[in-house]
Each structure stands twice: as C-alpha cells, then as structure tokens.
Image (spheres, grey):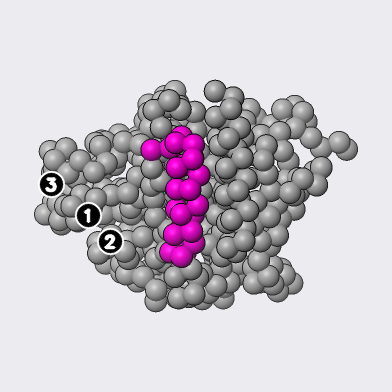
Amino acid sequence: MTVNRELFDEVMVPNYAPSAVIPVRGEGSHVWDQADNEYIDFAGGIAVNCLGHCHPALVNALKVQSEKLWHVANVMANEPAIRLAKKLVDATFADKVYFANSGAEANEAALKLARRFALDNYGEHKSQIIAFNQGFHGRTFFTVTVGGQAAYSDGFGPKPGNIDHCNYNDLAAFEALISDNTCAVMLEPLQGEGGIISPTVEFIQGVRALCDKHNALLIFDEVQTGVGRTGHLYAYQGLAVTPDILTTAKALGGGFPIGAMLTTTDIAKHLKVGTHGSTYGGNPLACAVAEAAFDTVNTPEVLNGVKEKEALFRQLFTQINDKYHVFKEMRGEGLLLGAVVAEQYQGKARDFMLASIDNGLMALVAGVNVVRFAPSLVIPEADIREGMARFEKAVAQVVNAQ
Ligand SMILES: *Cc1c(COP(=O)(O)O)cnc(C)c1O
C-alpha cells in the first residue's frame, strides 16, 4: 500500500490540514520523514513529547508493562495507576486523582465535578462557570464552550448553559462577572493556544481572592503548562496561587495518551461511586509510561535545565531578531515560548512555521500572530543551536519572499 498525503485526503475526515511531510521515526529531538529528511523538533507534538522521541526510560516502561498487563477496566484497580496517583499527590497540593485519556476529558471531569460540588453544597442557582477569551480547554462540547473562542464552539447547535467569558488579565471585568452564583472559574495559568500569554501576578492572585470570596472553585487547566513545561513541575507552583482543581495531560504521558484531574479530598468526595467514569482512564500501559515520564521530569536537573534552555532560546532568538526585525518580542515561560510577529507580518505566523519545515525545523503557531516553540525538556544544547540556525534560514526565507 502506498501511504502518502493523497491517501490521507481520501480516507480521513477533513478536519485537519497536515503538512505534506509524514514523519516515520524519531530519536531525541530529531525526526525523519518518509523520504529520510531529518528535522529538529521544536514542536514536541504540541507540548506532548516532554522527553523527546523514544526516550529510553519511556520505551523501557512501555516494553516491560506490555508484557505484563495491558488493560483491566475500572472494575479492578491496577498497580501503575495507583503508583502514578501517589506520585502526583505527593508532588502537588492535591489529595486525589482521577485519570482520563486526554486534556479535554480531564477538563470535562473537572467541570462536572465543580457543578456537582456546587449543587450538593449550595443548590441549583450556583452553576455559572467563568472562563476567559482566547482560552482553550479541549473539544468536547462542554470544554469547547468553556474555551474562549466562539469559532470553535459555534455551529453545533445549543450549547451547555451558564458559561460566561471575560478578558484574561482584566481583573475589573472578572470582578464584575463573578458572584455567589458562580460555581467555578477555569483558566490556563499561561494561555497556550491563545497566543502564549502569561497572567499578571495581580490578576491571578485577584482571581483566587474573588473565588474565595464567592465560594467558587478555581480550576487551573495545566494541560499544556504541566509536567515541567514552565520549569516548575506545575505552573501554579511558580505563581504562589493554588487552585482547587488542576488538570494535566499532554506531557503527562510523554506521547502516550493520558490525562488526569487532581483535587482535594473535600472536593473529590462529590464524585461518588457511579457519578463519572471512563473505560480507558487509568489504563496500566498509559500509567506505566506516565510514571516513567514523571520520574524523569520531576528532578532538579530536568526542571532547572528548562530555565537554562529557555535562556539559550531567548539569546539566540534575540540575535536573529536583531538582524531581521520580524518579531516584536518572545513571550512565555520555560520551554513554552512564543515569538510575536511584528506589525508588517500580522496574521503570518504560519508562514514562518511552513518555512521552518522547508529548512528542517518543526515549529508551531499559537493563533495567527505567534510562532510557538514547545521542544523536549531535555533537548541538548547542540540541537537548540542547530534548530535556531535553521529557524534563521526560515526567517530569511519569509523576509525574502515579502
Ligand atoms: C491541548 C489542550 C487541551 C486539550 O487537550 P486534548 O488532549 O487535545 O483533549 C486542553 N487545555 C489546554 C490548555 C490545552 O493546551
């Protein structure tokens, strides 16, 4: 069978528009396509491959578990899930863990739990959910409606109700919206898909205080920022603000699908037996790989290394931009970085991403004005330098095409 991009168009639902390149293998921060062209990976499968491709610890965990037990559904517990939950609890504010298979599912669980918690404790009037414009929380109907981009949630008929939005980092607008009818507030402690936007300290602390005042649960969606991405195990740990519920996915499995919702005992108790569930959630294979990823990432060497690598990215980025002046700034934290295009390149972040592929570099966009990098947390210095050299060629290519 000839497997190529044409066959993709023939047999796949047309909701994605992938590039012409089809990757077939990877090692560390290098990827090869069908024609054996080599790429440096600054995309990390959208902040998923936190340890690059085929990291030996993850390969080993997958191999070992694959010869023991693949799946037992939640009518029985399993060892990898219990071990991973214990490690997540020990390393965070949380006491309890619920496993899912994706970010959207972890958020779906968080939102359902928040609604149930408010209903049990306060009654039906307390159902409002507040979230933020440009936020992204997944593509189930509940999570996409909580997400702050109508373009993603419109066109599917009536939406789940009582969900309101205001601007991120606008504490006054948020204060005007929240009340004793607010059940929960969901936000990313650094907006990823929305354009790599960090919260101000005043905003994030103000949101926490107002949630406390109105007995609303604060949910941090750390699907993209979690598992070392910002140089902290979870971003909240660098913000001096603790959420009531936290969701994590993407990097949690280092490339194996898994998500989780973390919370306190007092909140968790409202998800009684039978109230929620998932066939695959807590699957032994997924949890075994995630445990190996967690053990590898949650070390001072890896987490401190993220900050050092960030500094190198910023230095090399500045050198390129001093020469070409195509970007306004580099935003973000740790290895979740966004280069914001200058005025004359408005709407053209994708051009830089496509030119990067031409020059052997995998990068991402975050909206139409930001080129995003989310590489492996253990990417070697030489690969950062080589990748940025390729990025410079991509920038030159876009500039010359103007
Ligand atoms: C990617 C992402 C999600 C959705 O995760 P899926 O695994 O695609 O369902 C949710 N929230 C944030 C912040 C994300 O970046």
Query: Which residue is located at x 77 percent, y 28 percent?
Result: 6
Q: In this figure, which residue is indicated by the disc labeled 2?
A: 239
Which amino acid type corresponds to the residue marked 3 in the rendered image?
A: Asp
In this rendering, which labeled residue sits more in front, label 3 or label 2?
2
Asked whether 110 or 368 is in front, the reply is 368
Which stretch is magenta?
Answer: 306-328
At label 2, counting other C-alpha atoms closer than 10 Å, the crowd grade (few under 14, some 14-19, many 20 or more) is some
Q: Secondary structure at mark 1?
A: helix
Q: Classify residue 286 as left or right of residue 207.
A: right
Q: Name the secondary structure under disc 3.
A: loop
Residue 180 tag number:
3
Mark 1 closeness class: few <14, some 14–19, many ≥20 residues within 10 Å: few
* Amino acid type indicated by mark 1: Val
Q: Quadrant of the C terminus?
A: top right
Residue 48, given in percent of the width and then of the height, sits at 55, 54
Would you place residue 298 above or below residue 34 in this image?
below
Contact (CB < 8 A) between labels 1 and 2? yes
Q: Which mark is residue 101?
A: none
235 horizontally vs 12: left or right: left
Q: Is residue 78 left or right of residue 140?
A: right
* Residue 229, image quadrant: bottom left
Query: Which quadrant of the figure contains the N terminus?
Result: top right
Q: Is residue 283 visible?
A: no
Find out whether residue 309 is within the magenta segment.
yes
The residue that mark 1 highlights is 201
Residue 102: in magenta span: no
Choose between 371 and 227: the one closer to the eye: 371
Nearest the viewer among 344 and 38 is: 344
